[in-house]
Image (cartoon, rainbow, N blue to C red):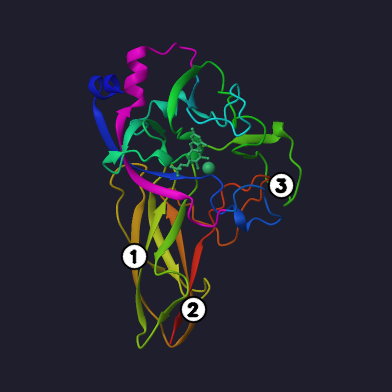
Amino acid sequence: MAELKNQFPIHTFQLVLECTGNGRSEFDPPAAGNQWTVGAVSCAYWTGIRLKDLLDKVGVKKDAVYVGYHGLDRHLSGDQTKEPISRGIPISKAMMEETLLAFQMNGANIPNAHGYPLRLVVGGWPASTSGKWLKKLSIRNVIHDGAKMEGQSYKVPCESVVPGAVVANADMRIIESMPVKSLLTFPKSGAMLENRLDLKVNGKAWAGERSVSTVDYSIDFGATWKSCQLSKPVNRLAGQSFSAHIFFPQKGYYEIWARATDMTGLSQPMMVPGWNPKGYLNNACHRIAVKVL
Ligand SMILES: Nc1nc2c(c(=O)[nH]1)N[C@H]1C(S)=C(S)[C@@H](COP(=O)(O)O)O[C@H]1N2
Ligand SMILES: [Mo]
């Protein structure tokens, strides 16, 4: 740890890590796995050294294509020869400026739950590529084949499939950049507005490898949309804050919908998109309910 900290320049980036299964609970038919609703995403400040600087120093052979991580956590079966998870990223992503070997999160030692003492942090990609409790890295001349790289883990069908379909492993591809998404973070769904017809809402938006160019909101089930204020990301791969001052036409029950669009013009779908066997990549719009009393 001391060598890592002393021999290389130290960098801090704010980076979005989103579990690929965030939003899984909405797939129909349901997909097995943690039934995430909306909260499996974070955007902390990560401080560490660039993975690139370490790889340049040790030297990477010309035929290297992938970097795999190995953590200190153990397989639930107790079998010491098995790893619970050992995923990775292509060399091109490993060499990007923002890909870190981090030893701090939000300016302090990384909390145990988030990977103390050292974590690979890969912003904008499935959070499963950000290996916690790092013990070792493998530089591979094939796509890394550690635990949860094979079978259907963190993969989606190459071609869209009928909901509920059985898909052969050979017809699945590894998920890389995460899609555009946003969350209304204030107020909580269920807010009651007494004696007023206006409300300030806040939220966060992110778009994997891309930035978000606009966020819009609707209070009439998508019939009309208005623009939100949107901040610039503090660095590439950071989340962006949005806000809006909403005026309701009269008392009643409303849903507030938020929809982000990335810099290439891709927006979030309104409905749960692209059913897939493991329930990944649900980036449907977030909706909250408010009652104006
Ligand atoms: N060593 C190790 N790293 C890991 C995991 C794990 O089980 N072991 N889980 C991954 C998955 S699936 C996710 S979504 C993120 C969660 O990161 P967080 O706990 O900091 O939110 O860590 C990733 N890194
Ligand atoms: Mo995850």
Q: Residue at x 67, y 41 (%)?
A: 159
Q: Residue at x 32, y 14 (%)?
A: 57
Q: Which mark is residue 243?
A: 1
* Image quadrant in which you'd find residue 260: bottom left
Q: Say what amino acid the circle numbered 1 marks.
A: Ser
Q: Which residue is mark 2?
A: 254
Q: Say what amino acid the circle numbered 2 marks.
A: Tyr
Of marks 1 and 3, the one in the foreground: 1
Q: Where is residue 33? Give x, y as percent.
A: 63, 47
Q: Residue at x 42, y 80 (%)?
A: 192
Q: Which mark is residue 195?
A: none
Q: Where is residue 10? Give x, y as percent.
A: 25, 29
Q: Which mark is residue 161?
A: 3
Q: Is residue 289 above or below residue 214?
A: below
User: Real-space Cα distance between discs 1 and 3?
Assistant: 36 Å
Q: Is residue 101 above or below residue 109?
A: above
Task: Determine contact: label 1, label 2, CB under 8 Å.
Answer: no
In the structure shown, which secondary structural element does the residue marked by tag 3 occupy?
Answer: loop
Q: Earlier in the sequence, mark 1 or mark 2?
A: 1
Looking at the rendering, in which quadrant would you find the N terminus?
top left
Q: Say what amino acid the circle numbered 3 marks.
A: Val
Query: Dot 3, crowdedness within 10 Å: few (<14), some or many (≥20)?
Result: some
Query: Dot 1, crowdedness within 10 Å: few (<14), some or many (≥20)?
Result: many
Q: Earlier in the sequence, mark 3 or mark 2?
A: 3
